[in-house]
Amino acid sequence: KEEIKWLFEKLTRTHIYRTLPRGIDPLYDIKIHLPRLQVNVVFDVGANTGQSAKRYLERFAESKIYCFEPVEKTFLQLQRNLRGYDDILSFKLALGAAKGTGKMVLEGNSDTFFLLNASREQVSGTPLLEEVNFETLDGFCRSQNIDHINYLKIDTEGADFDVLKGSEGMLTQQQIDVVQVEAGMN
């Protein structure tokens, strides 16, 4: 068996794993490497249309999931996709470094929309823009009486660091257990 595996790996220049390597599936990593972590509160920042939220509910069946999507059309799709899931709450809101408003560039698919001036993305021509509301994660949690987040996923197409800046209080107080930032390496 080992000889066949070795030969296959050599010929195809691949590696066969018995289990997934770390970093491929964050939910699997939590299950294997943090088995005692109770996940009761999940924040899905940049929820898009709810693809991740459904996976979180499958993996963390007893959790309350907070989804944040600031773009109107995408938010409406998120609400449609998550209708009937009582433990998933959706907010038409962007989380960032400060409370206020900003402009999203609606270029390409909804999962690639980005905040004007917060991303290294280049704006071509005259893009379609939408004004969105911002809150800090710390401010949102205070207003909702949330004192602990077990799993924070951030996928905001270039504004990820601003979300972390707005989470400084909770991060400093160790009120967030796991942070996943989806970032491209450009």
Image (cartoon, helix red, strand yellow):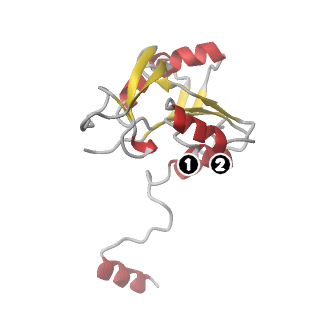
Residue matched to label 2:
59
In this rendering, position of residue 17 left or right of residue 107 = right
The image quarter in which residue 83 lies: top right
Foreground residue among 124 and 140: 124
Q: Amino acid at mark 2?
A: Arg
Viewer-nearest residue: 4 or 162 = 162
Image disc number at residue 27: 1
Residue 49 placement (x, y as % from top left): 55, 43
Amino acid type of the residue that numbered disc 1 sits on in the rendered structure: Leu
Would you place residue 151 above or below residue 98 in this image? Answer: below
144 vs 5: above or below: above
Is the residue under label 2 in contact with that under label 1 (CB below 8 Å)?
Answer: yes
Please name the residue shown 64% across and 20% down the image. 146
Image quarter where the C terminus lies is top left
Q: Earlier in the sequence, mark 1 or mark 2?
A: 1
User: Can you tell which quarter of the image residue 24 is in?
Assistant: bottom left
Mark 2 nearby-residue class (10 Å; few <14, some 14–19, many ≥20) = some
Provide the secondary structure element on which disc 2 rests: helix
Residue sitting at 42 percent across and 71 percent down?
A: 16
- How much space separates mark 1 and mark 2, taking CA atoms? 7 Å
Q: Answer left or right for 39 relative to 107.
A: right
96 shown above or below 36: above
Q: Residue at x 54, y 27 (%)?
A: 176
Tell which of 3 and 12 is nearer to you: 12
| Nearer to me, 89 or 132 | 132
| Residue 80 appears in the figure | yes
